[in-house]
Every structure is written in C-alpha cells, then in structure tokens.
Image (tube, rainbow, N blue to C red):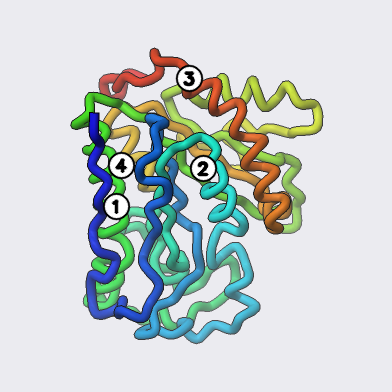
C-alpha cells in the first residue's frame, strides 16, 4: 500500500517569509516502519519578522528555547528504524506546539525565570498569527501523515521525542531517560523493561514528568484520541548535548524499539479510553 507523504507548506503567514527556515522537516517520509516519530521542540529558529523576542544568545542556548540534542537523536533514530519523523524547527519561546493554544504556557512571558520581552502584552491578533504560522501547519502535517497510515489500513505507533534538564530547582535528576505514558501500556512497559536490563541506565517511569497529567497536546490529540499505541520519551540533555552522545542514545533506543515495533499485534487502534 502507498502512504501519502506530502505535507503542507511551511510558509503559511506573514510571520514566516521565504528566507526563513522551514517550520518543520519531514524526515525519511518513505520509511517502511509503521511508526511516526515527532519532535515538538527540535529547534530554536526565529522568524526574521519577530527577531529574537529581545533575548540574548545565552538564553537561546538554554532548554527553555528548545529540547537540546533531540533533533539529532530523532533523525538518527528515524534512520535506524526506517521510520518517518516530523521535527519542529522554531523555538518554543515563540509558541509551544505541545500545549493547547488556550493554555497559559502556550506563549510564556516568563520562562524558568527568564523574561521574554517580545511576549509581554501580546495581543490576541499577534498570538493568533503565531498559531497560524507555527502551530496549525505542524499539527496538520502530523494529521496528514497519520491519515496516510490509516488509508493504508495501518494504526501506527506514535513516538514523541523530548529532552529534559539535568537539574530542576537545584535538585539533580537521576534518570538518564524517562518513559511517559497515560493508559496505553503497549509500548511503555516493554520499553522500560528492555532499557532496565542495562544496569548503567536509570529509567524513569513517568519521570521527570507524568504522562497521566495529560498536560501536553501532541500525544493527547494525535495518538490518544485515535487509540494508537504511543509513548513519550524524555532523554536527559547532558547525555545528548554532543553529536556523539545523541548518536549513542539513538542507537541505545533503536534496539528495544525495533523489537517492540516488530510485533504485528501492536498495530491496532484501541477504543478511546479503553487502553
């Protein structure tokens, strides 16, 4: 069966001009693995029309701007699994694509103690323009990819990729990797079991955040609402801040995921709420 692979144009409003980077990348669109990887916070681009929101470069190097290392991990993992992936390129300081648009953290005036001047006093019209440019086309592309799978009779696995800070409020986080999930255990439980076989890896079950809070948007809207097997993976950013580290963790994840994704019984949509 042929799966549709076209995606909407990344230049969707006055905020993104032809000289700006694309909103997202569609990686390995012809991948044969029945899974979709997404990285909501893969980049820290800014459109020329908005500048850097009044922020200096030191702030843009921090986790509040993007998920450090996750772009490379996702690209490498998609290639190894032969799976398609979508990676968002624009900083979450502009708008967080993993939050509902009416969530107070969708566009933050203050993020982890850093004031974002360009987000102060933002009008409804300006917020809507950001959503039109940075939110809707990305999620439309995810929908289109999943509809392509559905048209081919496939209920794909949905894998959301993120990274987390080494410390939070002065407390060091011991986990190397976190596996976040709500009700659907089909991918999370075997993944945690396989990762835990390595005594050098500290695995967090719904750590450092919990998937049961359903505080995000992407997994909840695209995977849970369709009953698709899903997982959100968080990797500690100090482990993947270098290319070598990112490549090593992509390889470390590839084998257990390959084994889990090889089960043909995985690919069925559960009734929503029945996981």
Measure the C-alpha gap from mark 1 to mark 3: 27 Å
Q: Nearer the viewer, mark 1 or mark 3?
A: 3
In this image, 45 relative to 16: left or right? Answer: right
Measure the C-alpha gap from mark 4 to mark 2: 25 Å
Please report whichever mark, 1 or 3, sits nearer to the chain's N-terminal start: 1
Q: Could you tell me which quadrant the N terminus lies in? A: top left
Please report whichever mark, 2 or 1, sits nearer to the chain's N-terminal start: 2
Measure the C-alpha gap from mark 3 to mark 2: 16 Å
Question: In the rendered image, which residue does mark 3 sit on?
Answer: 262
Q: Quadrant of residue 63?
A: bottom right
Please report whichever mark, 3 or 2, sits nearer to the chain's N-terminal start: 2
Residue sitting at x 35%, y 41%: 30
Question: In the rendered image, which residue does mark 4 sit on?
Answer: 221
Measure the C-alpha gap from mark 1 to mark 4: 9 Å
CB contact under 8 Å: marks 3 and 2: no
Q: Quadrant of residue 263?
A: top left
Q: Tag 2, which secondary structure?
A: helix
Q: Nearer the viewer, mark 4 or mark 2?
A: 2
Q: Nearer the viewer, residue 161 or 166?
A: 161
Q: Which mark is residue 238?
A: none
Residue sitting at x 31%, y 56%: 138
Measure the C-alpha gap from mark 2 to mark 1: 22 Å
Please report whichever mark, 3 or 4, sits nearer to the chain's N-terminal start: 4
Rendered location of residue 20, percent (x, y): 38, 77
Please report whichever mark, 4 or 2, sits nearer to the chain's N-terminal start: 2
Question: In the rendered image, which residue does mark 1 sit on?
Answer: 139
CB contact under 8 Å: marks 1 and 4: yes
Measure the C-alpha gap from mark 3 to mark 4: 25 Å
CB contact under 8 Å: marks 3 and 4: no
Rendered location of residue 34, percent (x, y): 38, 30
- Location of residue 176 with respect to 116 vertically, above or below: above
């Amino acid at each position: 069966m042929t799966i549709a692979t076209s995606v909407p144009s990344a230049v969707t409003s006055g905020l993104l001009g032809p000289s700006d980077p694309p909103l997202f990348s569609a990686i390995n669109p012809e991948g044969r693995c029945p899974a979709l990887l997404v990285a909501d916070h893969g980049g820290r681009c800014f459109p020329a029309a908005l500048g850097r929101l009044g922020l200096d470069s030191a702030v843009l190097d921090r986790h509040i701007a993007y998920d450090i290392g996750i772009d490379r991990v996702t690209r490498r993992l998609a290639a190894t699994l032969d799976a398609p992936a979508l990676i968002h390129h624009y900083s979450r300081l502009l708008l967080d694509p993993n939050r509902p648009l009416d969530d107070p953290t969708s566009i933050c005036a203050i993020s982890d103690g850093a004031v974002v001047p360009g987000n102060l006093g933002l009008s409804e019209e300006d917020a809507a323009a950001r959503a039109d440019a940075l939110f809707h086309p990305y999620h439309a592309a995810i929908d289109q990819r999943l509809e392509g799978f559905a048209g081919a009779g496939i209920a794909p696995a949905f894998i959301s990729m993120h990274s987390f800070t080494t410390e939070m409020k002065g407390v060091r986080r011991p986990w190397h990797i976190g596996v976040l999930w709500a009700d659907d255990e089909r991918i999370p439980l075997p993944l945690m079991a396989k990762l835990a076989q390595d005594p050098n890896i500290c695995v967090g079950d719904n750590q450092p955040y919990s998937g049961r809070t359903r505080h995000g948007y992407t997994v909840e809207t695209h995977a849970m609402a369709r009953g698709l097997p899903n997982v959100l993976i968080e990797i500690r950013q100090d482990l993947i801040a270098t290319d070598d580290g990112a490549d090593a963790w992509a390889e470390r994840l590839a084998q257990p995921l390959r084994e889990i994704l090889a089960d043909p019984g995985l690919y069925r949509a559960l009734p929503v709420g029945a996981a």
